[in-house]
Image (cartoon, rainbow, N blue to C red):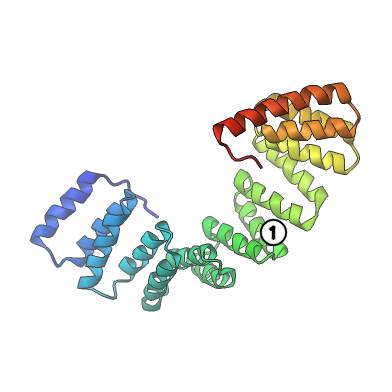
């Protein structure tokens, strides 16, 4: 949202100006945006509320207060401020988008979709808003709609690895394994250092009965990431399925060593 990098000096300068111009609402608003950009959200909240004391219908102060409460994870309060802002001026795509995100976080995906679509009607093809819309459809288990939305993003950003990750999850839900494999292969080209992709491709190979190919992918995964608990677990399972007992015993020893280290460190084991 912030195209300018602000510093504490910028905030101090405006605060000094406000001593001579205490009723300058736009200066107060700018000070609030600086604090918000510096992630000093408590100060930003106080300043935006000061703006509203001077002008109770200042739409951007209302909208940015919504952002403040979104950051504080007070989703109902954030929704209240976004709605007040947009009632005064419904032309702000950014606040429609943030309202959609607040609804998602408040577990109201249907309302989120309405808000996000309002945002896209103003600013079409916004990456963040489209991703949020796909998430809202996913929350409703509307997998086809979620996939279609992500395809829109990929049409604009065909090398966006994070979008492919989201797409893969949806394809898995839909059981479209051929497309899922193609997606993983594309992701592998984009990020050859992600050992998790080898694990996923190994799973698909086993599912298709290509056990040797799957096993080799599991071996490559633990070679690439020798401390991966999940990768070793999958390798052990693959070896046992294929009756390769000696290697399975050694792999299980390594798996147990990693499991013990994780338990000792207090890490959560899935």
Q: What kind of element bears circle 1?
A: helix
How many numbered circles does the render carry? 1
What residue sits 66% from the left and 31% below the top? 259
Viewed as shown, does residue 58 lie left or right of 138? left
Give whichever of 221, 148 is nearer the camera. 221
Give whichever of 103, 149 is nearer the camera. 103
Give whichever of 7, 125 is nearer the camera. 7
What residue sits 50% from the left and 62% below the top? 101
Q: In this figure, which residue is indicated by the disc labeled 1?
A: 147
What residue sits 71% from the left and 41% below the top? 186
Q: Quadrant of residue 58?
A: bottom left
Residue 104 screen position, x and y as percent: 54, 64
Residue 198 screen position, x and y as percent: 74, 35
Going by the picture, which residue comes out furthest to the bottom?
Answer: 87
- Residue 57 visible at all: yes
Q: Quadrant of residue 253?
A: top right
- Residue 33 visible at all: no
Q: Quadrant of residue 15?
A: bottom left
Image position of 13 with respect to 109: above or below: above
Residue 229 screen position, x and y as percent: 68, 33
What residue sits 20% from the left and 72% below the top? 54
């Amino acid at each position: 949202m912030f195209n300018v990098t602000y510093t504490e000096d910028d905030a101090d300068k405006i605060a000094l100006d406000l001593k001579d111009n205490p009723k300058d609402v736009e200066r107060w608003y700018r000070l609030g945006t600086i604090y918000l950009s510096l992630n000093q959200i408590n100060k930003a909240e106080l300043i935006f509320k000061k703006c509203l004391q001077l002008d109770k219908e200042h739409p951007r102060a209302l909208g940015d207060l919504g952002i403040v409460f979104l950051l504080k994870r007070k989703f109902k309060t954030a929704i209240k401020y976004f709605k007040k802002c947009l009632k005064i001026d419904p032309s702000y795509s950014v606040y429609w988008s943030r309202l959609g995100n607040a609804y998602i976080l408040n577990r109201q995906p249907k309302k989120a979709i309405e808000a996000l679509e309002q945002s896209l009607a103003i600013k079409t093809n916004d990456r963040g808003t489209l991703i949020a819309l796909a998430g809202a459809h996913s929350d409703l288990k509307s997998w086809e709609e979620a996939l279609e939305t992500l395809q829109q993003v990929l049409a604009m950003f065909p090398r966006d690895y994070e979008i492919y990750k989201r797409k893969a999850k949806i394809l898995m839900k839909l059981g479209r394994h051929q497309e899922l494999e193609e997606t993983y292969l594309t992701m592998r080209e984009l990020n050859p250092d992600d050992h998790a992709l080898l694990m996923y491709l190994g799973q698909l190979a086993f599912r298709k009965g290509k056990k040797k190919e799957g096993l080799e992918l599991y071996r490559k995964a633990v070679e690439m990431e020798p401390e991966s608990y999940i990768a070793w677990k999958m390798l052990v399972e693959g070896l046992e399925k294929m009756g390769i007992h000696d290697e399975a015993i050694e792999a299980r020893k390594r798996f147990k060593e990693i499991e013990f280290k994780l338990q000792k460190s207090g890490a959560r084991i899935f």
